Image: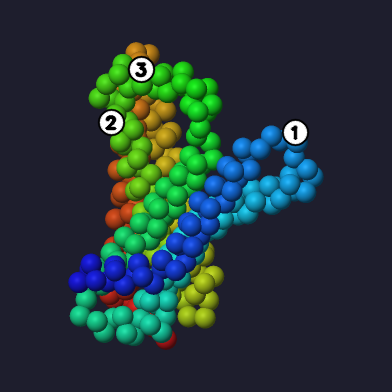
Amino acid sequence: MLGKMMKYEIKATQRTFLPIYGLIIIFALLIRSFTQFNFQHMSGAFSFLMGIVILIYVILIAAAFIMTIVATAKRFTTNLLGDEGYLSFTLPVKIHSHIDCKMLVSLMWAVLSVIVTLLSVFVLSVNTDFINKNNPLFAGLKADYSRYDNMAYLISFEIIVLVLISMLCCILQIYASATVGNLCGKHRRLASFGTFIGLGIAQMIVYSFIINYIKNFSLPMDEQAMLSAMAVNIGIAMAVTAAFCVAFYFLTYWLLSRKLNLE
């Protein structure tokens, strides 16, 4: 059933994201085409046109990430906390499935926004000259991975996982904030925004406490030991962020199951 719900959710949201993704790639290709010309022989009108294209490209990238946040909040509040909630909660589906569906699809679009942005940057920058100029950098990275072996791969993997968990935490923070704000009647949006800020401050306090705690330990001077310490610190950040994810998830679930207000 979760798969069917996600399929419907993707169909409902793809109309927002796919056109933006397509335009980002198209404008990246346009900029790449423009840069093939000799800048010294560009006319003023052509330079102005290229400036407009670059501006639109930047706006599209910003819009992709902003729309990810907006769509995450809007789909959750409309389908579960608005008038559509009456229909959604009459379906023979557990509340967990409603949350999981929205959460996984929102995470998918967030990851795709990052991938499309990186792909567009790749289209803009990668050519023979770029590769030749950065060969020493690529060679250095390859040497570092060979030198530190499994530890380098572990840290890279941890960073990727931390980014994914952080995205998920932000999504669940939005859900928890919207659900808390739903209890406040006419002032739902203001309460949701205030709750989101409050939860963000709570996270900052916890992270600051952990960072200060870690600073009390002297850093090892050996390179391998420093990498091990880095891997441990990233692991701690992953665990703390995952704990916030769990807290936000179950806060959302508890409020939807016990305190839901669709008036």
Viewer-nearest of discs 1 and 3: 1
Residue at 35%, 27% (x, y): give it: 230
Label 3 packing within 10 angstroms: few (<14), some (14-19), many (20+)? few
List the residue tagged with mark 3. Answer: 143
Q: CA distance from mark 3 to mark 2?
A: 16 Å
* Lower sequence index among marks 3 and 2: 3
Residue at 30%, 50% (x, y): give it: 243
Q: Is residue 252 left or right of residue 93?
A: right
Q: Nearer the viewer, residue 121 or 152?
A: 121
Q: Are marks 3 and 2 in contact (CB under 8 Å)?
A: no
Q: Amino acid type of disc 2?
A: Leu
Residue at 53%, 22% (x, y): give it: 133
Classify 150 as above or below 10.
above
Viewer-nearest of discs 3 and 2: 3
Label 2 packing within 10 angstroms: few (<14), some (14-19), many (20+)? few
Residue 98 rendering spot, x and y as whole percentages: 29, 71
Q: CA distance from mark 1 to mark 2?
A: 47 Å
Residue 168 rendering spot, x and y as whole percentages: 36, 54
Q: CA distance from mark 1 to mark 3?
A: 39 Å
Instruction: Check residue 154 in the rendering and tell me which mark sits there, or answer none.
Output: 2
Q: Is residue 27 left or right of residue 250?
A: right
